[in-house]
Amino acid sequence: MAVIRVEKRSERLRRRLIVLLVILAILGIAFWLFDKRFRVDPKNDVKVSIPNSTGIYTEEEIREYAYGKRWLDRYSIFVRYYYKYHKIEPLPFLERIDITVSDQDEVIITAYEKPAVACIYDMGFYLYFNRDGEIVTTKRENEDDLPVVKGLVYTNLTLFEKFKTQDEKLFDVILNLVSQAVEKHQIDVDEIIFNGDLSVVLTVGANTYRLGYRNAYDVQIAMIPEVEKRLAQRNADNGRTGGYEINMEGVFKSDDEFYAREITETDGSGGDEKTKNDASGDKTGDSESKPGA
């Protein structure tokens, strides 16, 4: 006759409890190993970098703003993948904030300030401003060789605030000039000069470009790199080193004609010596120099 053994309830509970304790012990060890391997020490494992900092924010301010507010920030493995797809809303004056993890599991916070695009010279200082017109730093010298804006009257030149002129529309004009000439066409503009009638003059090395008055100068500026090449070649062919005054006030289309005249070293006014060139730079007369059409 078969014997059926009935397991008591207390024995079943005990066996289940042992299994549960073993599972919890394994999970506890696994978590301890995970924590030891990937845990981020906020003081030693988090580095902050602010390339070309102008001192607007300190490293500690960036760290407090960007890191440590989420549970996953405690572990580098989560940080590595979370911030790859989630961006941090930047602070004012910052273009973006990136968070990455190095091969040594160090968390690297990199804050990029909005770069200065030009500057204003006032009271012995160069005031650098960004694309939003915010003055981000002041320097005794124009160390970065940024275009210097001249000829305007300012109603506000306060550090970390947007500069203001007698006409608010002029900021858009300045931004158009900087974005087109410096950023898009890589022209080494030295000065952006506003005359009394708000017409614009650009100085590029020894050359002066008269652009007239308008809201945007895209067409004229797009032509300047080629004009610079042709005038440099003309100087090389003629053995001269002087600059030119280029009048582009009447240019509205890329095929509009304009003229340049040589600036003499004696009076800087162009003098009486003028030559006329066609689009290829060949001499065709003795009136003025036509560097391009």
Image: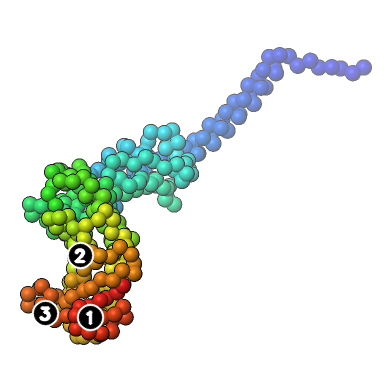
Visible residue check, residue 168: yes
Contact, mark 2 vs mark 1 (Cβ under 8 Å): no
Identify the residue shown where x is 18% and y is 46%.
167
Which type of secondary structure does the marked residue at label 3 adopt?
loop
Contact, mark 3 vs mark 2 (Cβ under 8 Å): no
Kind of residue at disc 1: Lys
Dot 3, how many residues are within 10 Å of its Cα: few (below 14), some (14-19), or many (20+)? few
Kind of residue at disc 3: Asp
Instruction: Quote the CA–CA distance across marks 3 and 2.
Output: 19 Å
Residue underneath mark 2: 210
Question: Left or right: 14 with respect to 214?
Answer: right
Residue underneath mark 3: 272
Q: Position of residue 89 (x, y in %)?
A: 37, 40
Kind of residue at disc 2: Arg
In the rendered view, tell whether residue 221 sits above or below residue 5.
below
Visible residue check, residue 205: no
Q: Position of residue 65 (x, y in %)?
A: 32, 37
Q: Which residue is more in the foreground, 114 or 205?
A: 205
Q: How is the protein colored in the picture?
A: rainbow
Looking at the image, the residue that sits furthest to the top is: 9
Instruction: Quote the CA–CA distance across marks 2 and 1.
Output: 18 Å
Residue underneath mark 1: 276
Identify the residue shown where x is 70% and y is 18%.
12
In the rendered view, tell whether residue 8 sits above or below residue 240.
above
Identify the residue shown where x is 14% and y is 52%.
152
The mark that comes first in sequence, 2 or 1, is: 2
The mark that comes first in sequence, 3 or 2, is: 2
Instruction: Quote the CA–CA distance across marks 1 and 3.
Output: 13 Å
